[in-house]
């Protein structure tokens, strides 16, 4: 090699080394699946009588559509994880089905309640991420999308083109247990997973039925008081009071069973310090709250 050619090679060496480092860095970072942090939602899945209704049939359903549209404009959603009040188990399970079925987990309704389908694909890859984060969560394919999920999702994402999976609620654990477990799901927010807690701040079926079936849709008063108390604690970021709801004088009246209240706890546990809370909907029916909020 001539001296001048050798000097040219020396001059190019730093550039070659820099390009090699860039290529190596690109190769490493291409394996990352981090995205902009996804928001977290809590919502009611609505009055059961709303299930067969079409898009924008009432203010609550319109609010769901608006929330879904806004999130899709702002974020790239890779999958949706629903913690539904209607999948309660012993232990915690996550559905790894590729095509979750539409489950009609209610009884005695007219035929149109049993003909609708929500054919969103599943997300086995993201569901398996849950078991990596929380090894005691077990995989299953023996579930689909229950009426805590699909009646809400059909308004929020009507094209059913976003993969969806559910994680169950261990019915036999405390509110604090659920709060601590839910915190471990935070990394999913950085991987394009929209997590939705689907339940109700106030859900007393016995008391609701006394008025619903007589056509009386006026709240009792105690239900409004508890619902507003929850809103106040949210605004104060007093999450521990919400977790310890049983200490509130109306706590066991508002949530005589934990199934519909626990999804609220899951959503709150995913909130980072100083994250914005947006109250997305507020409505009281007798012993039943349609409150919803967005975190982030």
Image (cartoon, grey):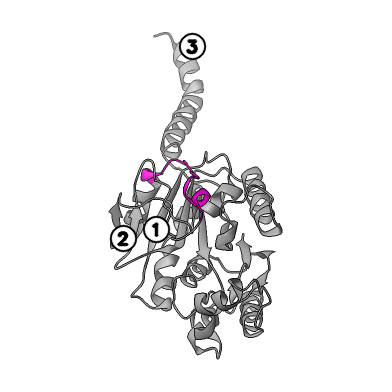
Magenta-colored span: 110-125
Q: Which quadrant holds the C terminus?
A: bottom right
- Give the x, y percent position of residue 80: 49, 50
Residue at figure coordinates x 53%, y 41% from the top left: 160
State which tag comes first along the sequence, 2 or 3: 3
Q: Residue 137 carries which label?
A: 2
State which tag comes first along the sequence, 2 or 1: 2
Q: Residue 185 carries which label?
A: none
State which tag comes first along the sequence, 1 or 3: 3
* Element carrying mark 2: loop
Residue at figure coordinates x 52%, y 84% from the top left: 253
* Element carrying mark 3: helix
Residue at which label 3 appears:
4
The residue lying toward the viewer, choosing from 50 and 85, is 50
* Real-space Cα separation, disc 2 to disc 1, in angstroms: 9 Å
The nearer-to-camera label among 2 and 1 is: 1
- Judge whether 220 appears above or below 72 on screen: below
Residue at which label 1 appears:
167
The residue lying toward the viewer, choosing from 7 and 203, is 203
Do callouts 2 and 1 mark residues in contact (Cβ within 8 Å)?
yes
Classified by dominant secondary structure, the portion drawn in magenta counts as loop
* Element carrying mark 1: strand
* Real-space Cα separation, disc 1 to disc 3, in angstroms: 67 Å
């Amino acid at each position: 090699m001539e001296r001048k050619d050798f000097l040219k090679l020396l001059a190019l060496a730093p550039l070659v080394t820099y390009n090699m480092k860039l290529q190596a860095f690109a190769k490493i970072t291409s394996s990352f699946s981090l995205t902009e942090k996804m928001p977290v939602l809590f919502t009611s899945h609505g009055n059961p009588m709303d299930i067969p209704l079409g898009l924008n049939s009432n203010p609550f359903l319109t609010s769901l559509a608006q929330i879904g549209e806004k999130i899709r404009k702002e974020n790239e959603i890779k999958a949706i994880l629903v913690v539904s009040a209607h999948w309660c188990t012993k232990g915690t399970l996550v559905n790894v089905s590729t095509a979750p079925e539409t489950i009609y987990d209610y009884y005695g309704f007219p035929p149109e309640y049993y003909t609708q389908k929500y054919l969103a694909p599943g997300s086995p890859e993201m569901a398996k991420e849950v078991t990596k984060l929380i090894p005691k969560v077990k995989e299953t394919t023996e579930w689909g999308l229950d009426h805590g999920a699909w009646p809400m999702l059909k308004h929020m994402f009507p094209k059913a083109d976003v993969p969806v999976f559910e994680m169950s609620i261990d019915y036999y654990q405390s509110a604090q247990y659920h709060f601590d477990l839910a915190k471990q799901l935070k990394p999913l927010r950085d991987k394009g997973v929209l997590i939705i807690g689907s339940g109700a701040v106030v859900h007393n079926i016995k008391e609701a039925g006394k008025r619903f079936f007589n056509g009386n849709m006026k709240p009792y008063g105690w239900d409004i008081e508890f619902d507003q108390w929850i809103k106040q604690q949210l605004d104060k970021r007093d999450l521990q009071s919400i977790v310890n709801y049983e200490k509130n004088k109306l706590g066991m009246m508002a949530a005589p069973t934990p199934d519909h209240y626990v999804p609220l706890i899951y959503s709150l546990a995913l909130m980072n310090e100083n994250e914005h809370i947006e109250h997305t909907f507020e409505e009281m029916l007798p012993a039943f709250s349609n409150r919803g909020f967005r975190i982030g």
